[in-house]
Image (cartoon, rainbow, N blue to C red):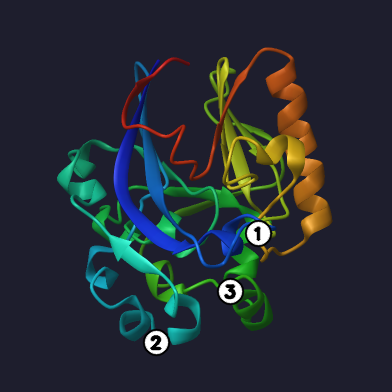
């Protein structure tokens, strides 16, 4: 199995929004990753990065100036400019935030999406959409097969790719275990978050997020490599060892 990290954008925002206790006056430029997993029979994209159409003026594109009042988006290449999306067999969405689902429209509708049922349901509930800062313009619409899963899931039924329900950041956030590698995604934006629990100030449920962080910390302490969601010191594009 081959795993590669793609750099599909950046967002810059006050540090204190994305790690509690940090200074609001300091800006951090966060990388936005997506991952390509290749097996003997599958080519799976995990998350899709930013929406190219939203980069220049996300507040206007999404009609949500409240979300983007203090954020700047950048992108050199979209996910579709970095790989042949027609070769994909599945897209796994870890959750429905705009920096993870923004490139979904670049993927052929013949490619099925795999997501937790509770996340998909939240993405279509008005109250949950508002609470979690979801932007349905990126994922709403008919014509694509959506495979809904409930809890932990052996994706290919061979033990090689395990989807892990790790809620809290959003209602149905999921992480991915690939052998000895765990994509923790936004359970913690920074690697240190598994220990200090200094999460973003926003969350669907901070207590659930703490429990999810403790689950991933236990996996890390057992010898697995856990990759955080947006840590600029950790995330670098290129091959990863699973």
| SS label for mark 2 | loop
- Mark 3 or mark 1, which is nearer the start of the sequence? 3
Q: Which percent across, then down, holds residue 198? A: 71, 50
- Residue 212 lies left or right of residue 239; in this view the side is right
Q: Quadrant of residue 172?
A: bottom right
The residue beneath circle 1 is: 170
The quadrant of the image that shows the N terminus is top left
The residue beneath circle 2 is: 63
Residue at point 62%, 70% (across, down): 132
Question: Number of numbered discs present?
Answer: 3
Q: Are marks 2 and 3 in contact (CB under 8 Å)?
A: no
Q: CA distance from mark 1 to mark 3?
A: 13 Å
- Mark 3 or mark 2, which is nearer the start of the sequence? 2
Q: Which percent across, then down, holds residue 37? A: 38, 28
- Viewer can see residue 142: no
Q: CA distance from mark 2 to mark 3?
A: 18 Å
Residue at point 18%, 51% (across, down): 76
Q: CA distance from mark 2 to mark 1?
A: 21 Å
Residue at point 36%, 32% (across, down): 236
Residue at point 43%, 15% (across, down): 241
Q: Is residue 112 above or below residue 59?
A: above
The residue beneath circle 3 is: 124
As rendered, which of 128 and 189 lies closer to the eye? 189
| SS label for mark 1 | loop
Q: Nearer the viewer, mark 1 or mark 3?
A: 1
């Amino acid at each position: 199995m081959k795993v590669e990290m793609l750099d599909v954008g950046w967002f810059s925002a006050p540090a204190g929004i994305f790690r509690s206790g940090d200074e609001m006056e300091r800006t951090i430029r966060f990388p936005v990753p997506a991952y390509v997993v290749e097996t003997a029979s599958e080519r799976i994209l995990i998350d899709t990065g930013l929406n190219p159409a939203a980069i220049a003026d996300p507040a206007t594109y999404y009609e949500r100036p409240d979300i983007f009042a203090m954020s700047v988006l950048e992108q050199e290449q979209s996910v579709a400019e970095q790989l042949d999306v027609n070769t994909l067999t599945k897209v796994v969405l870890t959750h429905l935030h705009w920096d993870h689902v923004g490139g979904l429209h670049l993927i052929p509708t013949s490619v099925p999406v795999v997501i937790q049922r509770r996340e998909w349901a939240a993405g279509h509930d008005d109250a949950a959409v508002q609470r979690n800062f979801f932007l349905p313009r990126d994922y709403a619409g008919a014509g694509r097969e959506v495979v809904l899963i409930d809890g932990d899931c052996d994706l290919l039924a061979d033990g090689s790719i395990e989807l892990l329900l790790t809620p809290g950041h959003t209602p149905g956030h999921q992480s991915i275990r690939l052998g000895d590698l765990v994509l923790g995604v936004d359970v913690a934006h920074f690697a240190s978050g598994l220990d200090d629990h200094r999460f973003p100030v926003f969350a669907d449920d901070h207590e659930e997020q703490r429990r999810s962080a403790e689950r991933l910390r236990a996996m890390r302490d057992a010898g697995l490599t856990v990759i955080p969601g947006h840590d600029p010191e950790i995330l670098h594009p290129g091959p990863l060892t699973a």
